[in-house]
């Protein structure tokens, strides 16, 4: 029942945005040029994970490709997916399960570049428990209440896999939605037994005594790609020169960010309230250019096995 309601709300959001939109942005079908830059809007969550695009704009990687980029902050996939479908954004940032779910419902999305990947162990995302919790391993999460920011998405998909692989029964976990900024308090106040939480909230929780039970991205797969930049299949097929220019600039931005962590941290202070002191201790994501298709195949299969998708996704449709 809950899943059907969520699907209905997503469809309604898309239709509402489509009705309000002035149509597909005039990004042009011809090749962008530095003489007459093409204006595009990219919807991104203003978090550490999206530092490469902010850095790339500052470094001129996009203007070099004839693109005049407006980075539009969004609240997450719930806004970026319908925003791209309705034409409010030319491209947007979102995790791969969000894209798989959208295509499972026939929305026709296409990832054009990678966005961020697991950093390994330690990582920028983890499941935490209170210091005095009796939970010691992923298998111990069976039968417990665990929070994620969104149900039926990349958080619960990776956690359930890690729990099952550790010998637990993930079908007995009661997943509930708690926003990342509120997750540490939910654990401290015993509202949940464990919480999935990302940086910078992860770092704060651990500093306050919380224990990490699993770095669920890297424990799911040590090479897992988490998020990427996507557009509609219509744009991908109808404006190949625009897509190529965006891919070139975005991949250059990812390469630069991955080799310049100090500049990543500096740019993050320009669009968030985070300080350099907070960022110094933080584990940054990896910013890989190449897609890890094997890990994404594994992710899609897990999402289908747990009922988040009606069938395993077609990666040839989802990825370029």
Image (cartoon, rainbow, N blue to C red):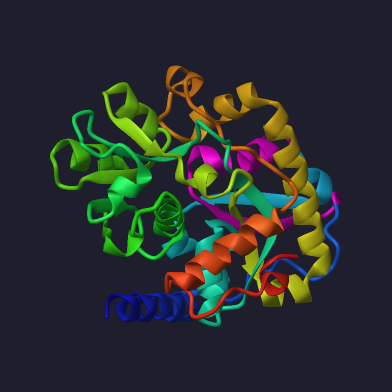
Q: Residue at x 84, y 49 (%)?
A: 34
Is 186 located above or below residue 176 in the figure?
above
Is 43 colored magenta in this rendering? yes
Q: Nearer the viewer, residue 307 or 135?
A: 135
What residue sits 68% from the left and 75% below the top?
A: 233
| Residue 180 seen in render | yes
The total number of labels drawn is 0
Residue 86 appears in the picture as rendered: no
Q: Which residues are magenta?
A: 34-59
- Location of residue 14 in the rendering, given as x and y in whole percent from the top left corner: 46, 76
263 and 188: which is toward the camera: 188
Q: Is residue 75 left or right of residue 87?
A: left
Q: Position of residue 94 (x, y in %)?
A: 54, 57
Residue 290: x %, y % from top left? 75, 49
In the picture provided, is 13 more to the left or to the right than 285?
left
Q: Quadrant of the N terminus?
A: bottom left
Identified at 56% across, 61% down, the residue is: 299
In the rendered structure, does residue 196 fall within the stretch colored magenta?
Answer: no
Furthest residue to the front? 167
> In the image, what residue occupies the spot 27% across and 23% down?
208
Q: Nearer the viewer, residue 88 or 272?
A: 272
**Quarter of the C terminus within the rendering:** bottom right
């Amino acid at each position: 029942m809950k899943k059907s309601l969520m699907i209905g709300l997503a469809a309604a959001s898309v239709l509402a945005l489509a009705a309000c939109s002035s149509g597909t942005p005039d990004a042009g079908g011809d090749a962008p040029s530095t003489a007459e830059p093409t204006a595009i809007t990219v919807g991104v969550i203003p978090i550490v994970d999206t530092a490469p695009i902010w850095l790339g704009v500052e470094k001129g990687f996009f203007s070099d490709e004839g693109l005049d980029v407006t980075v539009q902050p969004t609240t997450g996939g719930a806004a970026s997916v319908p925003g791209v479908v309705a034409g409010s954004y030319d491209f947007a940032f979102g995790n791969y399960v969000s894209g798989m779910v959208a295509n499972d419902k026939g929305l026709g999305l296409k990832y054009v570049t990678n966005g961020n990947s697991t950093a390994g162990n330690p990582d920028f995302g983890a499941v935490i428990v209170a210091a005095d919790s009796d939970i010691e391993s992923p298998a111990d999460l069976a039968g417990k209440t665990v929070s994620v920011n969104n149900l039926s998405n990349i958080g619960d998909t990776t956690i359930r896999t890690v729990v099952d692989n550790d010998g637990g029964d993930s079908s007995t976990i009661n997943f509930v939605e708690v926003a990342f900024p509120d997750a540490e308090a939910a654990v401290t106040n015993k509202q949940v037994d464990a919480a999935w939480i990302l940086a910078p909230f992860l770092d704060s929780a651990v500093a306050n005594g919380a224990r990490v039970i699993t770095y669920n991205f890297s424990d799911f797969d040590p090479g897992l790609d988490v998020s990427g930049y996507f557009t509609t299949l219509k744009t991908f097929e109808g404006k190949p020169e625009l897509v190529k220019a965006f891919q070139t600039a975005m991949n250059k931005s990812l390469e630069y960010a991955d080799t310049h962590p100090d500049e990543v941290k500096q740019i993050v202070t320009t669009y968030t309230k985070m300080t350099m002191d907070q960022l110094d201790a933080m584990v940054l994501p990896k910013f890989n250019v190449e897609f890890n298709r094997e890990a994404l195949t594994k992710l899609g299969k897990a999402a289908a096995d747990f009922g988040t998708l009606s069938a395993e996704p077609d990666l040839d449709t989802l990825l370029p």
